[in-house]
Amino acid sequence: MRTNNKRLRSVIVSCCALLVSGCAANMPEPQAALPHVLNKEAATTYHYLLFEEATRQNDHSSAEDALSNLLKLSPPIEVYLEAVNFYLRTNKPITGRKIATQGIKNFPKNFQLVLLKAESYRLENKLEKAVGVLRTYLEANPQSDDAIRAIGLLYFDSGKFPEAVDAFRESAESLRTPVTRLYLAKALIQLKKYDDAEKELITATEQKATLLEAWSELARLYELKQDYVLAEQAYEQLITVDTSNEVSWLRLINLNLKLNHPAKALELVQIGPTSKEFTIEAATIFISEGFYKEAQTMLEPFAENNHPVEVFFHLALIAFEYEKDLNKALKLLNNIPQNHPSWIKSLEFRSRILYQLGKTDEAIGLVQSARERDPQSRFLLELETELLMAAKRQADALKTVNSALAIWPNDQELLFTKGSIYHAMGNQTRALEVMEEVISRDPEYFKALNFVGYTLAEMGKDLDRALVLVRTAATLAPGQPYILDSLAWVYFLREDYKNAWTYITQAVTLGTNDPTILEHYGDIAKQRGNKAEARKGYKKALKSHSNPALIRKKLKDL
């Protein structure tokens, strides 16, 4: 039996011959008279075997019949547990709850049945009723740390962390178990009460030094507090208790790199788990923290054996970022075959390297050949379009997007891209038509709302509608510098310089380096008579503006 009822199992062995030969292979059909022939113990075994066979066959109806007969025989506690679990698994919590209630009457001290009854309410999203079941048990068993912890976990899993903390703390300090302290600490961390959580976790590890989750939570807590030295100590304790825990080894390596101890981090790689997966994952941490040479040392032995293939991607990244050798990076990426999971991201990497090398046509050809093999890949489609636009081949980009729209005619993102291409081609009328179509399909597509609003303002058309559109876009996508800039510019063109300054200041405060936004900042500041801020905006815009002569003139005119 799944519940490990040894008594029932021993009876099963002795009753097989009595029931029928080959008892588990071909069970007889249930007979109404059988329970009268067999004694209670044998009948219990017989119906349980029927239940097991029915569940193996996913025959829920027969399984329920067998359980019905079992429950009439005043069975042992394991049968009640099995029955409740069956009904909860088959999405019949009400039936499961009725059986749990019956079982609790017969076995009032059994906490598993109480938990299952509470679970039946939880499955129906009746949190307080589930808690009520446990509270009733707690009244009869006031020192039950298990019941207190179960109440706390119900609140915790429901995201009610203050209630979870209150529940966990009902357990008397002297009786609070390490596991309860662990979950109390987790709830406290959710409430950002880090010092209280730290106390509970330290006590939990003192009570039970082998409670790995408590050590792990303590280490993560110290990371949250940015106390990397104590976090390192906690992870060291964790790997001392469980040397095979690769996650903890990797976190400890990462911490040492954050503390600028690459030699110690490398030593940890050498003495840690021996799997190649661990070594490669450790190397990626070294790369992400900027320790490229050490990562290269770890990865090159794998490359010499051409296995595993993904190391070539990591080595190419090192060649690109650290050695600044773009041709070497390309050569390394060529080792990744088309049938490998890393091939698509290597293709993107290769195409971008080719673009940086000035081999734009070769980069585009590489992606186009890949698209011929997989014409419905959105990733390749977007990459090809991006490269074509970078090469100022707008007409070809338009053909690519139109071919994609033939496959996905209702794709709003593709339609927006099509409008953007028309804009880049200088065809504002067609761009507006396409963007209006996007809005008609989805009135909350904020990128199109912003585009149409800003374009109308630039064209000096319908400034009232332009304002409505960009304000709606700003509401749908708050904190976007380019939308705040659009809003500021519409206000500027409406000669509402106060609101224009408010929104352009917000856009620039968000840290943008967009030269158009910085130019607008200068224009609005100038209009308000603030020449110092205007000069600041123009100077920043000049660094990357497409028309530096215009910006120089504006600076000269201040």
Image (tube, rainbow, N blue to C red):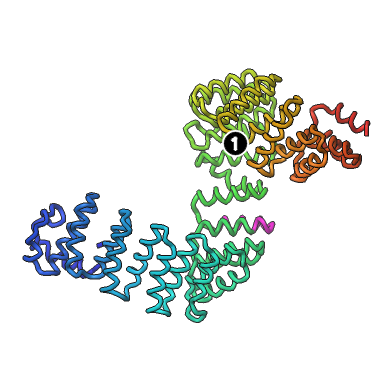
Horizontal and vertical percent position of residue 542: 84, 33
Q: Residue at x 63, y 61 (%)?
A: 224
- Packing grade of label 1 (10 A; few <14, some 14-19, many >=20) is some
> Foreground residue, 68 or 127?
127
Does the stretch in magenta take in 101? no
Check the image and report above or below for 349 versus 21.
Answer: above
User: In the orientation shown, which residue stands out farthest toward the bottom?
Assistant: 174
Point out residue 101 in the picture as x, y percentages from the top left corner. 30, 68
Decide: is 558 above or below 65.
Answer: above
Quarter of the image for residue 350 reads top right
Residue 535, horizontal then vertical, whole percent: 89, 38
Side of 428 relative to 314 (left or right): right
Q: What residue is drawn where x is 67% and y is 44%?
A: 478
Q: Residue at 47% across / 75% down in the picture?
A: 177
Residue type pointed to by label 1 = Glu
Rendered residue at 66%/42% (across/down): 475
Q: Secondary structure at mark 1?
A: loop
Q: Is residue 363 visible?
A: no
Give the camera-side residue of 57 and 160.
Answer: 160
Quadrant of the drawing holding the N terminus: bottom left
| Magenta region | 256-270
Name the residue carrying label 1: 444
Query: Where's the C terminus, which quadrant?
Result: top right
Determine the main secondary structure of the stretch shown in magenta.
helix
Q: Which of these two is toward me, 164 or 13?
A: 164
Q: Is residue 528 left or right of residue 24?
A: right
Q: How many marks?
A: 1
